[in-house]
Image (cartoon, grey):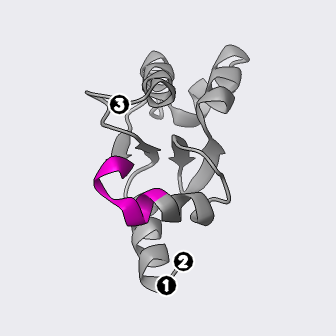
Amino acid sequence: MDEALKNRIQSIVDSHDNVLFMKGTKHFPQCGFSATAVEVLRRCGAEFETFNVLEDMDVRQGIKEFGQWPTIPQLYVKGKLVGGSDILIEMFENGELQPLVSPAS
């Protein structure tokens, strides 16, 4: 990945506390895994931004290298990769995700 793409992805990751790289948008997910990730985050009451990788093939490929994670969706919280939909489900079910992504009280 070239430095410009790496910097661009870092800027997206740093732009919000919770950023979900996904196929589609939170209002119109375009794959089952992305829809699951959105639903889990909504159940947590999380405020989150999304980046539609279907609209940018460079980011779609680059995010996999950036996070060293082979699949999409990918959730970043405060600049750190949390994981994909399976990990989000597991963390939600055991109560670890809610305090991580929910707005501070």
Whether residue 34 appears in magenta in the rendering, the answer is no
* Cα gap from disc 2 to disc 1, whole angstroms: 7 Å
Of the residues shown, which amino acid type is indicated by label 1? Glu
* x 53%, y 43%: residue: 72
Residue 33 position within the rendered picture, expressed as x and y whole percent measured from the top left: 51, 28
| Residue in view at x 54 percent, y 47 percent | 77
Q: CA distance from mark 1 to mark 3?
A: 29 Å
Q: Say which residue appears at 37% left-offset and 34% top-offset.
A: 47
Whichever of labels 2 and 3 marks the residue nearer the N terminus, that label is: 2
Residue 52: tell me if it is visible.
Answer: no
Residue 5 placement: quadrant: bottom left
Front tag of 2 and 1: 2
Give how far across and how far down residue 85 sits, in percent: 59, 30
What is the x, y in percent for residue 57?
A: 38, 60
Q: Which mark, residue 3?
A: 1
Dots 1, 3 in contact, CB < 8 A: no
Q: Which residue is mark 3?
A: 30
Amino acid type, mark 2: Met
For the stretch drawn in magenta, the main secondary structure is helix
Q: Are marks 2 and 1 in contact (CB under 8 Å)?
A: no
Q: Which residues are magenta?
A: 52-60
Q: Give 103 or 87, whichever is nearer the viewer.
A: 87
> Counting other residues with Cα less than 10 Å from the Cα at mark 2, is it few (<14), some (14-19), or many (20 or more)?
few
In-image side of 50 versus 19 (left or right): left
Looking at the figure, which quarter contains the N terminus? Answer: bottom right
Front one among 80 and 60: 60
Q: Is residue 13 above or below residue 86?
A: below
Residue wearing tag 2: 1
Q: Secondary structure at mark 1?
A: helix
At 54% from the left edge and 44% from the top edge, which residue is drawn? 74
Q: Which is nearer the N-term, disc 1 or disc 3? A: 1
